[in-house]
Image: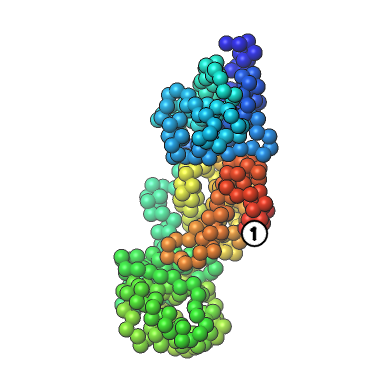
């Protein structure tokens, strides 16, 4: 071993201190000594199924994204399945440097990979380089083992029975007249779900539909034609589409008198055999039609806002939501700090579940550590909708924006908000990224 490289593998620091404080500088020194043109260390986050860049060399602030090493790609699988370094040559893949070779080495074992090393170098003999990279990979495994200790299990803040019930079922138990409402819905085919903004009215409507109409279709109608003739035709078409299923009409009190008259006449006198769910916030309608108001009040269910839940109930609701959202992002090892949990309990939710879920999801997407802190709960962005709509929701713009926000927030965490590297990874120009971030309220 060259004397110039000996000190690279030894340090007074170990474990997490070595990974956090020494790894970036040691990687730069190793690459310099070995004559490497550029290289990167990618490690797996503790208790997660996500990989993040931990150290880089030779890219400048522009950085570079190796698209051929995306999870599940052919090259990824080759590297993760190989106990020996995998060498690639330019021409087939897009490298940072022209006319060079790339060496890839898995860190850890096939069954427990910690990440990988990637270096670009001038074509030629790579025996010494492979040996040194292998030793460096072993060094990383050793320090990660010290840092993470024996494989840990995620700390559960909620009981197993509550975990099985899920956040939705737990919330449903807080609705006082739900059982009677569902029973009447089976008989009368009409139901009104009233509650504060963002309190989960459409979610509850879909759950009730699954209980009553089972496998029949459900359609959520987000907008009504203003032309009365077109509205009558649309109601007929929607009814034919769902058959014995359910039609959900959100924000029903925003309709004008003519629209309400047509809707009431259609439900009362047509051959429609399915069910209708109306949803809206509590309060008076802009324009009142007595027959239609009586229809709304025939079978109402009132949803409580988060601010009306007892503190212990809200605490469990937060734990359940957090558990579901972090696992949806493959971050099951993440936890909430005491200050963050207290902040969530004390916050006044203007948009209720929507605001709570978006705040938690945003923090999960941007948190780089293993514990979410109070400052990462971005309530300044409470208007952002990060949840991609379900299949029944036809709002295409909302779905696209929610997905774009999620991907950009994830890129912000992976690349430490370096917009050049984010843009390359996302496959768009830096100007397009900045425009999207402004449009989506992320800057």
Residue drawn at (47%, 67%) of the image: 394
Residue 435: give x, y in percent of width and height.
66, 56
Name the residue nearer the viewer: 392 or 248: 392
Count of numbered circles on the image: 1
Looking at the rendering, which quadrant does residue 22 occupy? top right
Residue 359: give x, y in percent of width and height.
57, 54
Name the residue nearer the viewer: 206 or 400: 400
With 1 as the anchor, is 393 left or right in this view? left
Residue drawn at (43%, 34%) of the image: 77
| Label 1: which secondary element | helix
Residue 365: give x, y in percent of width and height.
56, 47
- Judge the density around disc 1: few (<14), some (14-19), many (≥20) Cα neighbours within 10 Å: few
The answer to whether residue 232 of the structure is visible from this angle is yes
Name the residue nearer the viewer: 78 or 203: 78
Asked which colour scheme the image uses, the reply is: rainbow
Residue 23 vs 321, above or below: the answer is: above
Looking at the rendering, which quadrant does residue 57 occupy? top right
Residue drawn at (37%, 51%) of the image: 164
Residue drawn at (46%, 35%) of the image: 76
Residue 231: give x, y in percent of width and height.
46, 82
The answer to whether residue 139 of the structure is visible from this angle is no
Q: Quadrant of the N terminus?
A: top right
Residue 286 vs 40, above or below: the answer is: below
The residue to which callout 1 is attached is 439
């Amino acid at each position: 071993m060259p004397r110039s490289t000996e000190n690279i593998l030894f340090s007074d620091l170990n474990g997490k201190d070595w990974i956090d404080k020494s790894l970036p500088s040691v990687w730069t020194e190793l690459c310099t000594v070995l004559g490497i043109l550029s290289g990167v260390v990618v490690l797996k986050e503790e208790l997660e199924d996500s990989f993040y860049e931990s150290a880089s060399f030779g890219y400048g602030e522009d950085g570079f994204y190796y698209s051929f090493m995306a999870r599940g790609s052919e090259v990824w699988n080759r590297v993760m399945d190989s106990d020996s370094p995998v060498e690639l040559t330019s021409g087939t893949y897009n490298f940072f440097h022209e006319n060079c070779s790339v060496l890839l080495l898995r860190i850890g074992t096939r069954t427990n990979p910690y990440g990988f090393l990637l270096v670009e170098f001038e074509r030629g003999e790579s025996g010494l380089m492979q040996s040194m990279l292998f030793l460096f990979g072993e060094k990383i495994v050793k320090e990660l083992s010290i840092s993470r200790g024996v494989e840990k299990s995620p700390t559960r803040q909620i009981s197993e029975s509550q975990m099985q019930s899920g956040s939705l079922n737990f919330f449903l138990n807080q609705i006082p007249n739900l059982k009677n409402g569902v029973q009447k819905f089976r008989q009368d085919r009409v139901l009104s779900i009233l509650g504060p903004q963002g309190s989960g009215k459409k979610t509850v409507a879909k759950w009730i539909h699954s209980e009553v109409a089972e496998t029949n279709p459900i359609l959520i109608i987000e907008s009504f034609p203003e032309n009365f003739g077109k509205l009558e035709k649309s109601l007929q078409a929607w009814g034919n589409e769902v058959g014995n299923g359910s039609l959900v009409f959100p924000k029903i009190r925003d309709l004008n008198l003519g629209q309400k008259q047509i809707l009431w006449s259609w439900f009362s006198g047509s051959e429609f055999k399915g069910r209708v769910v109306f949803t809206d916030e509590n309060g008076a309608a802009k324009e009142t039609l007595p027959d239609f108001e009586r229809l709304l009040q025939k079978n109402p269910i009132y949803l409580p806002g988060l601010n009306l839940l007892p503190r212990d109930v809200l605490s469990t609701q937060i734990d359940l939501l957090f558990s579901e959202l972090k696992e949806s992002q493959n971050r099951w090892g993440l936890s909430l700090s005491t200050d963050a949990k207290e902040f969530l309990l004390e916050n006044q939710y203007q948009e209720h579940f929507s605001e709570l879920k978006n705040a938690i999801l945003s923090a999960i997407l941007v948190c780089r550590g293993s514990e979410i802190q109070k400052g990462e709960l971005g309530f300044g962005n409470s208007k952002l909708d990060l949840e991609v709509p379900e299949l029944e929701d036809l709002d295409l713009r909302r779905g696209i924006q929610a997905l774009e926000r999620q991907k950009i927030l994830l890129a912000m965490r992976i690349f430490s908000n370096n917009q050049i590297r984010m843009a390359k990874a996302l496959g768009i120009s830096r100007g397009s990224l900045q425009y999207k971030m402004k449009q989506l309220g992320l800057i």
